[in-house]
Amino acid sequence: MLKNNIMEIVKIILQIIVGFGILNVWLLRFNSKTSYRGGNAGNMKEEFQAYGLPEVMVYIV
């Protein structure tokens, strides 16, 4: 029982960390170059273009 509770807490903590990481890249660094960007993209729009997606998809996603 205790092991299940600890695993559930660890799972929630990891989800929070991943969530903040995504929010960081998508909101705070939207127009910044980061090591997470695909190709040579300098911002979110360029990253979507690097993947062959139209610019409007940035806002849909």
Image (cartoon, helix red, strand yellow):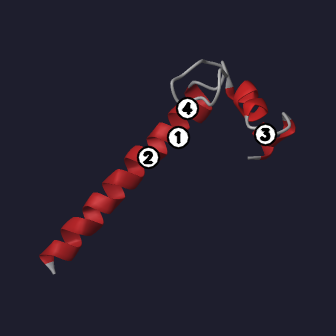
Kind of residue indicated by mark 3:
Tyr
Disc 1: which residue: 22
Q: Determine the secondary structure under disc 2.
A: helix
Q: Is residue 17 above or below residue 7?
A: above
Q: Which mark is residue 25?
A: 4
Residue 24 appears at what percent x and percent y? 51, 32
Residue 47 appears at what percent x and percent y? 70, 30
Name the quadrant containing residue 33. Answer: top right
Residue that sits furthest to the bottom in the current view: 1
Q: Which mark is residue 38?
A: none
- In the image, is 17 to the left or to the right of 32? left
Quadrant of image for the N terminus = bottom left
Dot 4 or dot 3: first in sequence order is 4
Which is nearer the eye, 37 or 14? 37
Mark 3 and mark 1 residues within 8 Å of each other at the beta carbon: no
Q: CA distance from mark 4 to mark 3?
A: 14 Å
Mark 4 burial class by Cα count in 10 Å: few <14, some 14-19, many 20+: some
Kind of residue indicated by mark 1:
Ile
Dot 3 or dot 1: first in sequence order is 1
Which residue sits at x=19%, y=66%?
6
Q: CA distance from mark 1 to mark 2?
A: 6 Å
Name the quadrant containing residue 34. Answer: top right
Mark 3 burial class by Cα count in 10 Å: few <14, some 14-19, many 20+: few
Disc 3: which residue: 59
Which residue sits at x=41%, y=54%?
15
Which residue sits at x=40%, y=49%?
16
Mark 1 and mark 2 residues within 8 Å of each other at the beta carbon: yes
Kind of residue indicated by mark 4:
Val
Residue 60 appears at what percent x and percent y? 79, 46
Q: CA distance from mark 2 to mark 3?
A: 21 Å
Q: CA distance from mark 2 to mark 4?
A: 11 Å
Disc 2: which residue: 18
